[in-house]
Image (tube, rainbow, N blue to C red):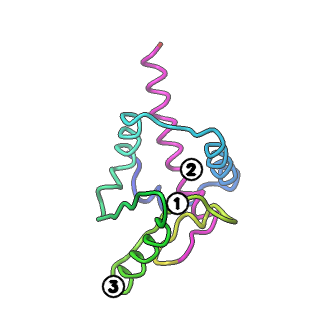
Amino acid sequence: MLNEEKLARRAPSGSRQRAIDVLYARGEHRFRMQLGALGRVLQLLGRPERRFPSILIGGTNGKGSVSAICDSIARAAGRRTGFYSSPHLVSVGERVRIEGRAADDDQLSGWLEVVLEAEEQVCRRVADSEL
């Protein structure tokens, strides 16, 4: 399992650009991971999605505004918040906000590198089992 220290660690500078490049490439090609494989990646990461309460906002219009309002209300109530939206306008870091502040590209790419490492492990296992 990949631990929280590893999630907090910054990736080496060469991998920072790789992580951002992979994210951009997926937007162009609509990469979709199967649900079972995604579950295995989350398992390797220690099930981070189960460590905090969350709100999922869906629909056609107004998701960004509703999300921003929910984030603002939660912070005003003293809650620690994280925010994800897509797409971004200028920088990939805009997609992720913690406590109302956008993640810088170094911070985001460090997290992405850890997730990509877990994903690669799962993909190798799937490929090995198909041989």
Residue 62 image position (x, y, % from top left): 48, 67
Q: Nearer the viewer, mark 3 or mark 1?
A: 3
Q: Nearer the viewer, mark 2 or mark 1?
A: 2
Per the image, the residue denoted by label 1 is 9
Q: Magenta region, mostly helix, strand or loop? A: helix
Q: Residues within 10 Å of mark 2 (few under 14, many from 20)?
A: many
Residue positioned 60% across, 67% down in the render = 94
Q: What label does residue 78 carry, if any?
A: 3
Residue numbers of the magenta segment: 101-130
Per the image, the residue denoted by label 2 is 113
Which badge, 2 or 1, is on the more N-terminal residue? 1
Q: What label does residue 39 carry, if any?
A: none
Residue positioned 36% across, 34% down in the render = 36
Establish if 77 lies above or below 87: below
What amino acid type should be assigned to the residue bearing mark 2?
Glu
What amino acid type should be assigned to the residue bearing mark 1?
Arg
